[in-house]
Amino acid sequence: MRPLALLLTVLAIACGSRALAPSTPAPVALTATGENVGVKLRLDLDRASLTPRQEVWATITIENMNNESIRWVGGGCNVPGHVTATVSALADNGRSWYYPFAELKKRLVTVYAQGYFPMLDEAAWQKRASGGQICTADIRVNELAPHGKLTSRFVWDGLIAGTPAPSGDVVITASLDIDDAKAMVGRTVAASLTLPLTGGAATRVSAPRAFDAALDDARFASWVRARFIARGNSEAAAYDVAGGVRLDGDEWVITATQKVAPAGEIEVRVSAIDGSVRTVITK
């Protein structure tokens, strides 16, 4: 047995979970393909469903079907492609509000994509117990020969920051960024698969929907309105209000603060199960 395979076998026994060596072909339960500018991407998953702390392995195979080389874009660790998991229960961006509230919601909640998590590539996964793999932040452009192939593998264990992800559909998306030197543009080839996650957290309401519920409550809405100011030529809004949303058990905790007059702080707790406002506390 090769040293790497032996190490992975020991890890699998110690951790009580699968840890496949790079040369070990994973079983294929679900498959999807995508194609763009003569580049084909195939996504294979080794599971058709998932429960937290199980591992779902995604294998992506990239084939250049052109008669000339293509250029693909990598990063510091230069792994071909990306794979992400989007958890449907967390990805709902909720309602669109008129400007003052829309500005606050975007800044405090939806400034980043919701429910969207990058899966770890195989090398990073194997090194996670020792602090993970460090990659530089540079962008690298690579060539893939005519009719050449690339393969990479990614994994997710159904956990978000160490806790079970919410039950429901999870969309696994694989993609490759292509540098089209002739057209002077970037292109993407991608494929997606959906698998159910069971036995996860009971969360049914996303952070943006919880924020919507808080804004529907007159106590929170009034607190925010009292802090609308005009700045430059822009419409009045709560520009000096800071805060955020975090999950605490089965509640979303929405906090908003303002240090300048009229200073103050407010906390709204919203059920992550049904979206009802449980408490509103001003300080």
Image (tube, helix red, strand yellow):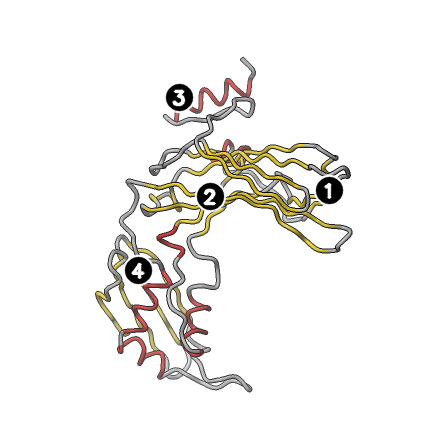
SS label for mark 3: helix
Task: Work out how far the residue at label 3 is from the one at label 2, CA to CA, in angstroms.
Answer: 27 Å
**Amino acid type, callout 2:** Ile
Which quadrant of the figure has residue 199? top left
**Amino acid type, callout 4:** Trp
Residue that badge 2 annotates: 172
- In this rendering, would 111 be left or right of 180? left
Q: Residue at x 30, y 68 (%)?
A: 213
SS label for mark 2: strand
- Where's residue 145, x and y in %? 74, 35
At label 3, counting other C-alpha atoms closer than 10 Å, the crowd grade (few under 14, some 14-19, many 20 or more) is: few
- In this rendering, would 95 be left or right of 233? left
Tell me the quadrant of the picture where the C terminus can be found: bottom left
Q: Measured along the vertical axis of the image, is residue 120 above or below residue 262?
A: above
- Where's residue 220, x and y in %? 30, 75
Residue that badge 1 annotates: 70
Residue that badge 3 annotates: 13
**Amino acid type, callout 1:** Ile
Residue that badge 4 annotates: 252
Mark closest to the chain's N terminus, 2 or 4: 2
Task: Work out how far the residue at label 1 is from the one at label 4, CA to CA, in angstroms.
Answer: 46 Å
